[in-house]
Amino acid sequence: MSANRSFVLTIAGFDPSGGAGILADAKTFEQHHVYGFAVNTGNTIQTENEFFEMQWTDLNFVLRSLEMLFKKYSIKAVKIGIVPSLDYLKEIVFTVKRLSPKTKIVWDTILKSTTEFDFISIKNQAFLIEILKEIDLITPNYDEILQLSSEEINAETIAENLSEYCAVLLKGGHNPDEIGVDYLYLENEIFRLAAKNASVFEKHGSGCVLSSGITANIALEQDLKTACTNAKKYTETYLQSNQTKLGYHYA
């Protein structure tokens, strides 16, 4: 099965509208010509405009799914989406690394939905750092990264500090000074990733598309800068696909 495609995995929530979560990730994986697996962290009742309810998947069920997948398949990269707690996240991350130490992990730091439903609260900075040391890249926006630090400092300083533990792609969609400009923080380097086209339309799940695109590109053995740059281009095409909040996927 899929002998010529790299295997990737999304561990995220199910959005019945298909704009976000594992459905959006699967669409993105397919367009990047990688073979995608999915483990569901929770079911939602939502549309692209409203969020009504969340039911989390039992952690042991998730971990058993991971055991089964990694036992049979050589998965090159994993994207993690919504989780209910840092404890839940840690169990997933450490299980992946135990089963497959070379697998790369991208955490899309979704702390709340675009309709303001809270998923996870960061209260223990030391515990967060312990987890980040096992992750390869996180993809917070300007609002999210402020919640990833216990210090009251600016987003750029937080990103630089966190890059000591893992790479940080600071997304610029919520930055009023440079809308659409992302910054990739590596341990000793910072790269500016500018938007190619300003005429885009807001989309439900654009962060999911970006992070799963990066995950796919990592599985295709692109370095982090190239993976992020190419995923950003793909996401911009997604944002330009129509004027509604539910976008179309094009390679």
Image (spheres, helix red, strand yellow):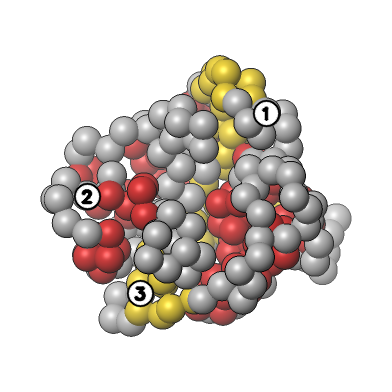
Using the image, determine if residue 7 lies above or below residue 149. Answer: below
- Give the residue type that dot 2 points to: Ser
Q: Are marks 3 and 1 in contact (CB under 8 Å)?
A: no
- Whether pointer 3 and pointer 2 mark residues with C-beta atoms closer than 8 Å, the reply is no
Position of 229 compared to 96: left or right?
right
Identify the mark at residue 186; answer none if there is no mark: 3
Q: Nearer the viewer, residue 169 or 187?
A: 169
Looking at the picture, how far across and down is residue 162, in whole percent? 27, 61
Q: Which residue is mark 2?
A: 149
Where in the figure is residue 122, as x and y percent of width and height?
28, 38
In primary-sequence order, the first of circles 1 and 2 is 1
Disc on the earlier residue, 3 or 1: 1
Q: Earlier in the sequence, mark 3 or mark 2?
A: 2
Q: Is residue 43 visible?
A: no
The answer for how far apart the CA atoms under marks 3 and 2 are is 18 Å
Left or right? Give the position of 144 relative to 103.
left
Compute the Cα span from label 1 to label 2.
31 Å
Q: Quadrant of the N terminus?
A: bottom right
> For residue 47, which numbered disc appears in the image?
1
Residue at left offset 57%, top offset 24%: 51
Residue occupying the point 63% across, 21% down? 45
SS class of the residue under badge 3?
loop
Secondary element at tag 2:
loop
